[in-house]
Structures are given as C-alpha cells and as structure tokens.
C-alpha cells in the first residue's frame, strides 16, 4: 500500500479550492502525489504528467515482456513431438479428477 504524508492528502472540497496550487506543487515536484479523499476514503491520486508517462511506459514494457514470454512458451511447445502429448483422460487421471473438471 502506498503511504501518504499529511501534506499529500486533500479532501475533495479542499482540493477543488486549492487546485491551482496543488497542481503547481505536483508540477514543481514539491509533492510527488496528491491523494484526494471523499468521506475520508482515498478516491483518486494526482501525479505529474512525467510520472504518468513513466508508469505507462513501464506498464507497456511489462505487457511486451509477458507477450514475449507467452510467445516463447508456444514456440517451445511446438517443438514437442506428438508422442510426448497426453490425452485428456490421462491428464484427469494424473490429477485424480474427472474429465469434466478439466
């Protein structure tokens, strides 16, 4: 869970009143993030554009890595001779379940 300093938390009412200075604090990096509270519950987080773009690039890199890993697994499995495959019945028996549970 992300931790917030007291000066990083704003009620939604206070945030709307101070939006200009709050966004400036984010832009100038005097605050890393701002948590917006509604009924004392964290509802949203404001971060800089640079941080958002960094996080999106990281997310895309992770997705690409995951897709590459899946692709490599498929390519490896394609090299498995059919004689090494097992039937559904054998798989169910191996795990002690019925074929319908597969």
Image (cartoon, rainbow, N blue to C red):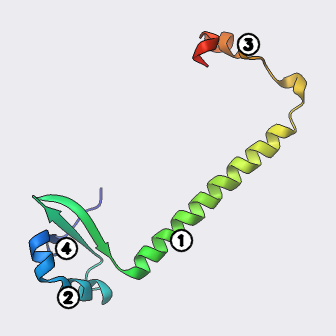
Tag 3's secondary structure?
A: helix
- Residue in the picture at 61% in, 19% down: 102
Q: How far is disc 4 from disc 3 in space, using C-alphas? A: 58 Å
Residue 57: give its label.
1
* Number of the front mark, 3 or 2: 2
What percent of the width, then of the height, locates residue 32?
Answer: 30, 77
Tag 1's secondary structure?
A: helix
Q: Earlier in the sequence, mark 4 or mark 3?
A: 4
Q: How far is disc 3 from disc 1 in space, using C-alphas? A: 44 Å
* Number of the front mark, 1 or 4: 1
- Residue in the picture at 82% in, 24% down: 85
Q: Earlier in the sequence, mark 4 or mark 2?
A: 4
Q: Which residue is mark 4?
A: 8
Q: Which residue is mark 2?
A: 20
- Residue in the picture at 59% in, 58% down: 63
> Vertically, is 83 above or below 49?
above
Dividing the picture into quadrants, the one containing residue 50 is bottom left
Q: Earlier in the sequence, mark 1 or mark 2?
A: 2
Q: How far is disc 1 from disc 2 in space, using C-alphas? A: 27 Å
Label 2 Cα crowd, 10 Å radius (few <14 / some 14-19 / many 20+): few
Q: How far is disc 4 from disc 2 in space, using C-alphas? A: 15 Å
- Residue in the picture at 86% in, 33% down: 80
What percent of the width, then of the height, locates residue 47?
Answer: 33, 75
């Amino acid at each position: 869970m992300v931790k917030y300093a007291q000066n990083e938390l704003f009620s939604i009412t206070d945030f709307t009143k101070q939006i200009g200075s709050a966004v400036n604090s984010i832009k100038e990096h005097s605050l890393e993030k701002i948590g917006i509270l509604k009924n004392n519950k964290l509802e949203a987080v404001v971060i800089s554009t640079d941080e958002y773009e960094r996080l999106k690039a990281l997310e895309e890199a992770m997705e690409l890595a995951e897709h590459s890993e899946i692709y490599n697994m498929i390519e490896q499995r394609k090299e498995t001779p059919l004689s090494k495959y097992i039937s559904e019945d054998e798989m169910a028996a191996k795990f002690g379940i019925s074929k319908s549970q597969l």
